[in-house]
Amino acid sequence: MKEFLKLDNKLVIKLKIIPLSPLTIKYSSNDRNDEEKDDTYVAVITTEKNMRNEKDEKKPWKKLTIEKGSIKDEVRVGEIYIAGSTLKGLFRDRFLTSSKNNNEYVDNLFGFVEGDKAKKSRLFVQDAFLSDEKLRELFYANPKEALKQVTSLRAITPVDHFSSKAKVPLQYEYTMEKFVTELTINNASLKDLQALYFLIRDSINNEIRIGNSKTRGFGLVKFEIEDLKYEQFKSQNDELEIFEEYFNINDKESKKLGDKYINKSLHLKDDFKKVDLEKPNKFIVALFEMGVN
């Protein structure tokens, strides 16, 4: 409990999600039986106007219909987004891989509930929204125009593996727009920051997909750091303090008592935000010279 009552530091990472292949979209108004329950999607934020009461089983979910390349949707309201829970599940899997299946480490970072045992998460992931604020606003000002600009349709005709005959064509609505999410890690360790950069490395190597129909070529994404904020508190247990030279101090966000900082708010310098696998910058070199876990 002590680690949640006292903060040694905090990392806040603004992470851009760049689609390298289409991200499929689902609708909260879809018939639940039509969905692949074990998969994830780019979802659509909805309002009370188009949400069915979960308890009213007699009323069916309103369906969206696709005719002649256009979508007939009189019920959808809201912007597209990627759920933070979807991203957190992905990050957990990747962190587990990069830590060589170190469950104890991953449980310490992501938290867990097992029987009468539980641990709070140190990592929090926000929903990812479109990085273009004007497009976000357009979804509420003119939904039809927003859909026109942001989404497209693709038809795929799957083949039966047994008979080799073509099945009924499938229609997918998708987007290629960029998204932005925010990660917060309390009491971040050297290993946490290294794992984050392993995640970014894997995305550059085309190893990360999100969303539905990944086996059909959808959902390939790359991550980029837009901002990495490091909040430094007066503590002897802060492993990341040695990297302070790679950050700029933001005095407006920091707090002082006299001429001494109570806490510092630092942002990674622009020169060190880009991740180049062939020529890693000085910050990344220093980060991994401290030991790969």
Image: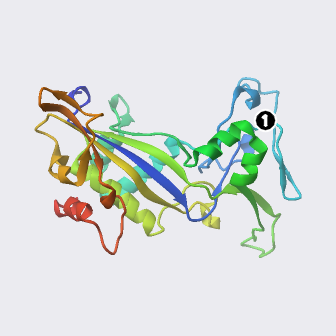
Give residue 170's position: percent from left, percent from top: 78, 61
Where residue 11 appears, x then y in whole percent? 31, 42
Q: Position of residue 56 (x, y in %)?
A: 76, 24
Q: Quadrant of the N terminus?
A: top left
Q: Quadrant of residue 140?
A: top right
Residue at 25 percent across and 36 percent down: it is 251
**Which residue matches tag 1?**
61
Secondary structure category for the residue under label 1:
loop
- How crowded pointer 1 is (Cα within 10 Å; few <14, some 14-19, many 20+) is rated as some
Report if residue 272 is visible in the image. yes
Kindly tell me whether residue 80 is visible in this rendering.
Answer: no
Q: Where does residue 252 sit, x and y in percent of width and height? A: 29, 34
Question: In terms of depth relative to the viewer, which is nearer, 40 or 71?
Answer: 71
The answer to whether 51 appears left or right of 87 in the picture is right
Q: Amino acid at mark 1?
A: Trp
Name the residue nearer the viewer: 266 or 152.
Answer: 266
